[in-house]
Amino acid sequence: MTKDTKAVIFDFDMTLADSSYAIHHCSNLLARKFGLEEVSREVVLAGIGLPIEDCWRLYWGDFKEEWLGYYRDEFRGVEQTGIRLFPNTVAALEELRAKGVKTGVVSNRRFARRVVDATKLTPYMDVIIGLEDVTNAKPDPEALFKAIGKLGVGADEAVYVGDTDIDMKTAVAAAVRGVGVTTGNFGEDGLAAAGAWRVCSDLIEVPGLFGLR
């Protein structure tokens, strides 16, 4: 990464915050309600990064609007209160912004702004794009194109940071440099195989890629 990088855009779940325990807890509350098989945290981790419909098809082989309505009505608040930022999330964002780098979120969550608000990260973000803002979910590059357009930067001036192969494939499709973080379900080899330009174990490493420290 070079000094001409003007924007660093992040995935949310398991990149900026550990949402796995909250999603695991709420998914099993839903399972108990509708007589579905409870899932392990490992299964939940495997689904994080997918739209919720695809997550549930992964868990239970099915998706029903009834489940989604109940989940949103009963568990959205519970889930949000259980999400925890990774220890160096705020420090990394503060360092980037202090260097004049724009920051944002591109997520396959619908209504992504709600979790960004809930984790008090909104003041650090110049753009937030969720599934409600686009027609196609990642790894289609539509959301990333929309974010860099709103930020007023070129693809060659932007970086996308994420924890899954989906994130890295999105970056490749958008001709944006992808930085993988191993805080989710993918290790260094899996992220590199999906097209990561660099791989970090902690977000605090990301500003250092600029050579500005």
Image (tube, rainbow, N blue to C red):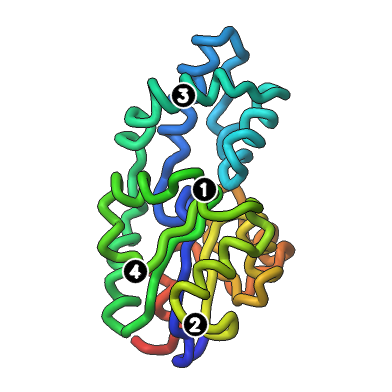
> Disc 3 on helix, strand or loop?
helix
Residue on which disc 4 sits? 92
In the rendered structure, the answer to whether residue 189 lies left or right of residue 42 reads right
Pointers 1 and 3 in contact (C-beta within 8 Å): no
Residue type marked 1: Glu
Pointers 4 and 1 in contact (C-beta within 8 Å): no
Residue type marked 4: Ala
Q: Count residues near mark 1 (Cα–Cα under 10 Å), then give few for <14, some for 14-19, many for 20+.
A: some
User: Which of the numbered marks, if any, corresponds to residue 132?
Assistant: 1
Residue 87 horizontal/vertical position (percent): 32, 55
Residue on which disc 3 sits? 71
Residue under the point 31% across and 77% down = 97
Residue on which disc 2 sits? 153
Q: Nearer the viewer, mark 4 or mark 1?
A: 1
- N-term mark: 2 or 3: 3
Q: CA distance from mark 3 to mark 4?
A: 32 Å
Residue type marked 2: Val
Q: CA distance from mark 4 to mark 1?
A: 27 Å
Does 157 sit above or below residue 163? below
- N-term mark: 4 or 2: 4
Q: CA distance from mark 1 to mark 3?
A: 17 Å
